[in-house]
Amino acid sequence: MWQYINGGTSARFLSSSARASKWWDHVRIAEKDPIVAVKEAFRADPFPHKINLGVGTYRDDEGKPFVLQSVRDAEAEIKGCKFEELSSSAVSSKFVLESVKLAYGNDSHVVKEGLFAGVPALSGTGACRLFAEFQRNFCPDSQIYLPNPTWSNHHNIWRQAGIPVKMFHYYHRDTKGLDFSALMADVKNAPDGSFFLLHPCAHNPTGVDPTEEQWREISYKFKAKNHFPFFDMAYQGFASGDLNKDARALQIFLEDGHLIGCAQSFAKIMALFEHKVGCLSVLCTDKEKSAAMKSQLEKISLAMHSNLPMHGLLLVTMILSDTDMKSLWRKELKDMANRIQTMRSTLRQSLEKLDSSLNWEHITKQVGMFSLSGLSRDQVKQLEKDFHVYMTPDGRISMAGVTRSNVKYVANAIYQVTRMDEEVLCAGNSGNQ
């Protein structure tokens, strides 16, 4: 139609269109998350016996996704439910209450007195993102300290909320354990009133957790510095097989009088990865403050995703509130944790039987779903190329991907790539003598 309009108007329109076409010219391909990159590389590999050790979800001993019987029972219970007759607010409130009980204990004073603000979230990621937004809104000049290393998405979550990110020492690469002295020094040297993200159990990606005594020292130093502890608890029960034991860090901080923030995820511990069920809770000093904070969290949640899908919330609420289902789930969770512990022992034994000169004790000392193997990026690439074994570039092994049928193959693959480097190192040393 523009050929019928005078030249001046047409020219102005074309000029405006040309400018508009440049709006997105500066956008570049985003760097892939390392876990996503591993998934894509694994899928693209045509080798029939490839092994994915980068997966972050539980798999059974045949390497297949696993549906808990407790989840099936809950599904059967709600199958005939008329969702239009359910109150989403009532379901959410019940879900939050049961989640908070799981984190802090049924008999905790914060549960009995209602000294918490809680909202459902899109798994642990959504819970962390909600808290990051809350932190930005009400502590705009604050920053967050993340453990080095931590789950890669933690960086994205707080940075996209506009919160500056700093790191604190956590993992000792030589001992493959906790660098406790450096951790405590960073806690001490951080500005008073800093925010810290902590993994209460089954640290991702290292599998290294502080002892109970170390948690007490950390809590004491946090109290002295008035730091805010935010716990990301995605693996409660996976470290030891005991839900209460794995929540001990939260209980210690609670006993010491901290106001805690906690992100919970049921994606892993109930094998509900596709349902994205999570909870964010923040402890408060009184009921009035709880109401105020809850209203603000709900406002942020409404702007981010309006109402959450109810099906997953119903499943989790049903399991946590029904005595028989919860008992069955506890047993199934312990069975999952035991399988992972068995695979840790078997992998270590298999490597040691191959007469590897390296020390593999860290595989059984670390806990939870992940083990930071100590493999280099080049060794990880060699595993992919020569043995079709996939893991994240930092050498993180998902123990859920190790099974009785593939553990010897995995051990031999690791042995071969580490032996290659040992032989090169030995040859270099002999040549220098």
Image (cartoon, rainbow, N blue to C red):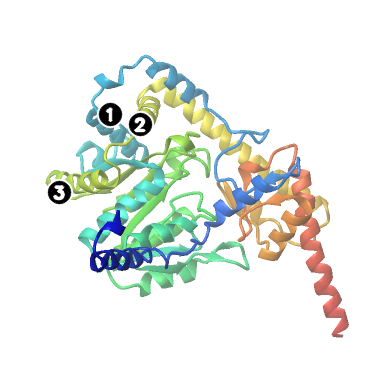
Q: Amino acid at mark 2?
A: Leu
Task: Say whether disc 3 or disc 2 marks the residue closer to the N-terminus.
Answer: 3
Task: Say whether disc 1 or disc 3 marks the residue closer to the N-terminus.
Answer: 1
Residue found at the far left of this picture: 288
Local SS, label 3: helix
Q: Amino acid at mark 3?
A: Lys
Q: Residues within 10 Å of mark 3 (few under 14, many from 20)?
A: some
Seen in the picture, residue 421 relative to 119 is either above or below; the reply is below
Disc 1 to disc 2, C-alpha distance: 7 Å
Residues under numbered marks 1 and 2 in contact, where contact means CB atoms less than 8 Å apart? yes
Point 51% across, 54% down: residue:
209
The residue that label 1 is drawn on is 91
The residue that label 3 is drawn on is 289
Q: Taking the image as drawn, is residue 38 in sight?
A: yes
Question: Residue 260: where, in percent of width, then height?
Answer: 30, 52
Residues under numbered marks 3 and 2 in contact, where contact means CB atoms less than 8 Å apart? no
Please tell me the numbered disc located at residue 414: none
The residue that label 2 is drawn on is 313
Question: Residue 350: where, in percent of width, then height?
Answer: 77, 48
Question: Residue 220: where, in percent of width, then height?
Answer: 34, 62
In the drawing, does residue 256 fall left or right of residue 276? left
Point 56% across, 38% down: residue:
58
Q: Residues within 10 Å of mark 2 (few under 14, many from 20)?
A: many
